[in-house]
Image (tube, rainbow, N blue to C red):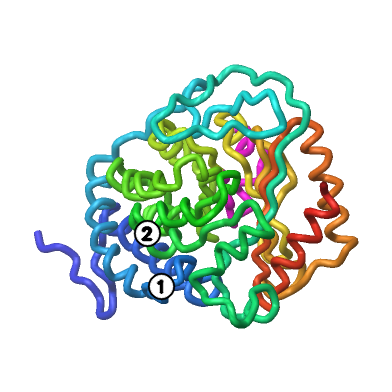
């Protein structure tokens, strides 16, 4: 018996594999291309070589489609969570300074940490290579190769954005390590291939490419920031699988979601059981929630008004300073980074908050 003839303009029926692939491709394309218009595209190593987002999309889309096809066909289950698995073991320091694990050293135990007198406070900016800071923060005559050294005279931490856009070689991380004092600490924004293209569903090779190279920072690597795409919903199984995969790296992790599904009590409990910090963001443009889920607090200030281009008032900063003092009294370390770089607001606001919170 002949099958039903399709009417003109009617699409050919497609199975679950094709539907899944279309959704994956659409989501990846939207999230990656949107970065060109909305996110802080920085060249932190100062080499002027930022690959554009369309190039990254073209290079990776075929890989994503192939892997997703295999995943849909085989439909492997995500491993279930275990209370003993975590992305970063608690740091059992007994002094005000955080004990940061060195590459190759065993991490502190996962038991309850001894009481600490006061948490560590580090405040800086998100990125440091901004030509529009010349004459505002950097002396006009200062060569760009000396900017990091100048920055380190005023701050003891910086959030590296460059690894998010283009994964640096280990040699570049080693140069960053040598360029700053021994007590300086870096936060590293995880590469977007893992966060925005693969959406945390990665293998050991991808983890090694990112974590293996950032190992060049040695003990100066303090936190790995995992910024998620705006349309990524909370998925406990996917998150747990990722955290298990990176757990042996013994790094502190902070997750910055852009979707409110990550802010529920259930989602926060998943983070809390694994010692992963919810990144607290200050901006009217994305949802946030003031909640602590780890032995440290991670803050990002995107600007109280226009994204990346608005300054904070003293009243706003005093509110955060009070919170920071309370967290430190509880023994929590605090890392805070200002992302409102336009107009030179970030370094001014960072220095002011440090004065108020100290």
Q: Quadrant of the N terminus?
A: bottom left
On the image, the x and y values in percent for residue 106 come to 44, 24
Q: Which badge, 1 or 2, is on the more N-terminal residue? A: 1
- What residue is at 63 percent from the left and 34 percent from the top? 98
Using a 10 Å C-alpha cutoff, classify the residue at mark 1 as few (fewer than 14 neighbours), some (14 to 19) or many (20 or more): few
Which residue carries the number 2 mark? Answer: 168
On the image, the x and y values in percent for residue 344 come to 69, 74
From mark 1 to mark 2, how far is it between C-alphas?
11 Å
Magenta range = 254-269
Dot in front, 1 or 2: 1
Viewer-nearest residue: 13 or 259: 259
- What residue is at 70 percent from the left and 78 percent from the top? 136
Say if residue 300 shows up in the picture.
Answer: no
Furthest residue toward left: 1
Vertical comparison of 64 with 49: above or below: above
Viewer-nearest residue: 65 or 83: 83
Which residue carries the number 1 mark? Answer: 47
Would you identify the image quadrant in which residue 2 lies?
A: bottom left
Using a 10 Å C-alpha cutoff, classify the residue at mark 2 as few (fewer than 14 neighbours), some (14 to 19) or many (20 or more): some
Vertical comparison of 103 with 313: above or below: above
Viewer-nearest residue: 281 or 62: 281
Instruction: Report helix, strand or loop for mark 1.
Output: loop
């Amino acid at each position: 018996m002949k099958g039903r003839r399709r009417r003109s303009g009617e699409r050919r029926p497609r199975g679950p594999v094709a539907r899944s692939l279309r959704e994956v491709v659409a989501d990846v394309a939207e999230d990656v291309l949107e970065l060109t218009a909305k996110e802080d595209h920085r060249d932190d190593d100062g080499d002027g070589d930022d690959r554009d987002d369309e190039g990254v999309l073209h290079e990776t889309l075929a890989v994503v489609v192939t892997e997703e096809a295999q995943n849909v066909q085989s439909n492997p289950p995500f491993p279930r969570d275990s209370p003993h698995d975590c992305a970063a073991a608690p740091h059992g320091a007994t002094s005000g300074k955080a004990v940061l694990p060195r590459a190759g050293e065993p991490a502190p135990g996962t038991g309850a940490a001894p009481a600490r007198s006061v948490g560590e406070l580090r405040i800086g900016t998100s990125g440091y290579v901004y030509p529009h800071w010349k004459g505002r923060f950097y002396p006009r005559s200062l060569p760009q190769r000396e900017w990091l050294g100048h920055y380190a005279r005023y701050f003891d931490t910086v959030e590296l954005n460059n690894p998010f856009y283009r994964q640096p070689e280990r040699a570049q991380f080693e140069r960053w390590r040598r360029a700053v004092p021994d007590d300086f600490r870096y936060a590293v924004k995880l590469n977007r291939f893992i966060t925005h293209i693969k959406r945390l569903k990665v293998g050991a090779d991808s983890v090694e490419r990112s974590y293996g190279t950032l190992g060049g920072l040695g003990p100066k690597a303090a936190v790995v920031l995992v910024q998620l795409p705006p349309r990524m919903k909370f998925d406990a199984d996917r998150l747990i699988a990722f955290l298990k995969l990176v757990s042996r790296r013994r790094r502190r992790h902070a997750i910055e979601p852009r979707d409110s599904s990550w802010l529920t009590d259930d989602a926060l409990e998943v983070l809390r059981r694994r010692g992963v910090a919810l990144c607290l963001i200050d901006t009217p443009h994305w949802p946030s929630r003031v909640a602590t889920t780890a032995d440290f607090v991670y803050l990002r200030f995107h600007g109280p008004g226009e994204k990346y281009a608005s300054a904070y008032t003293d009243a706003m900063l005093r509110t955060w300073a009070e919170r920071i003092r309370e967290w430190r009294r509880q023994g929590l370390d605090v890392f805070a980074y200002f992302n409102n770089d336009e107009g030179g607001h970030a370094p001014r606001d960072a220095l002011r908050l440090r004065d108020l919170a100290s």
